[in-house]
Image: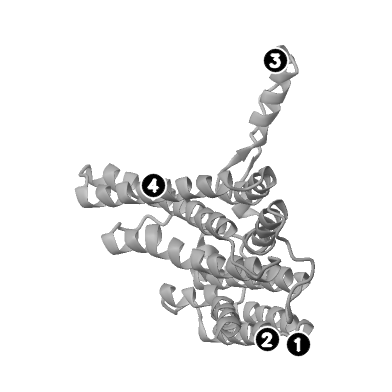
Amino acid sequence: MVNMSILTIPKLADELFLRPIVISMNSLALSALMSYVMSANESIDWRPITICVTSDILVMGADHLKDNLKVEEFSLERSNTKNPRLTSWFIYARTFLTASAVLLALALFQCPMSTLFTTATFVAPALLWTTPINFKKFGLISRRLLGRSGADKHQPSTASHVLVIKRIPGMKAIFNGIIRGCGIYAVVFSVLLGSGNLNNTLPSPWNVVQLIVWSTVNRSCHAIMTDVRDFEDDMTAGVPTIPVLLGSIPKTKVILTACHMSVMLAFIENRYITGSCLFATALVWMLGKNSPKKAFLFSSHSQSLFIIWYLLTRHL
């Protein structure tokens, strides 16, 4: 559901630029860590980092741009006047997304073909996140391709079955975890494997299972935290997020705490994961539905601070 609030320059700057950039910095930190520990010569490869950061910006920026364009169209219908300053910001946003797309294409051009397929596998579902998928149209297209278009004329009209991925209960958290956890690992793996620079044994205290599980759970929990922030709006709109399904923010926080503590106990020997899980748990209880939206950006970086700590200890 699009929130038809009044558009302002600060709101556009926040949603079209600040939030995509800040959130993508977690992908930068995580892909840099994976690139470093997974490379044979302990170097940081710019290609998977660029792919992950620009993909994040494109997916989130395009989604926010689409929502705000709907708000602008709604405002035009009511006032019939166009704000040139707002129009300029939409142009800036399109330029920003175009530049990100160019950087993404440049990075993919320098990678093996497998990286392109890997990136598409994880980016495509994110781009289709709020897109209505009409199964009736798919059926019509498939029948026409099979030469059965004539049969459609004799079939009674039926209601279209439209699916919106966002409306599937719990899918936001699952998608965020898989795309930003497993997806980043898959991209880094494909790039390093293709360049012959993949390390078979990761340096202590890291291993592949830690990287994937820690990242997936952390990203899923952060997605649920943003649902805590939007609890009342989602409840009103009928969006089936985890807090809405549970009907309680405290219950949601207990589950999030259990998830973070489970990861910490599973990898207790890794002090960076332990610190990250404790910090994330603290944020779960510090942040609530009345907290400023910008405060939730800290939740998106409960990994980043400890990744920076690890990388600094390796070079100081």
Real-space CA distance between mark 2 and mark 3, rounded to the nearest whole angstrom: 60 Å
The residue at which mark 2 appears reads as: 274
Q: What residue do we see at 63% from left, 49% from top? A: 119
Q: Which mark, residue 269? A: 1
- The amino acid type of the residue labelled 2 equals Thr
Outermost residue toward the front? 41
Residue 243 placement, left or right of 59: right
Say whether disc 2 or disc 1 marks the residue closer to the N-terminus: 1
Whether residue 270 is situated above or below residue 156 in the rendered picture? below
Dot 3 falls on a residue whose secondary structure is: helix
Count residues near mark 4 (Cα–Cα under 10 Å), then give few for <14, some for 14-19, many for 20+: some
| In the image, residue 63 above or below residue 25 | above
Q: CA distance from mark 1 to mark 3?
A: 62 Å
Q: Mark 3 Cα within 10 Å, few/some/many (few <14, many 20+)?
A: few
Mark 2, mark 4: which one is toward the viewer? 2
Q: Amino acid at mark 4?
A: Lys
Q: Which residue is mark 4?
A: 70
2 or 3: mark nearer the eye: 2
Q: Which residue appears at 75% of the width and 18% of the height?
A: 146
Q: Position of residue 212 (x, y in %)?
A: 72, 68
Q: Nearer the viewer, mark 4 or mark 1?
A: 1
Q: Which circle's residue, 1 or 3, is located before the other in the chain?
A: 3
Q: Earlier in the sequence, mark 2 or mark 4?
A: 4
Q: Which residue in the structure is indicated by mark 3?
A: 149
Q: Residue at x 75, y 66 (%)?
A: 199
Q: CA distance from mark 4 to mark 1?
A: 49 Å
As shown in the figure, which amino acid type bears the numbered disc 1? Answer: Glu
Which quadrant would residue 290 be assigned to in this image? bottom left
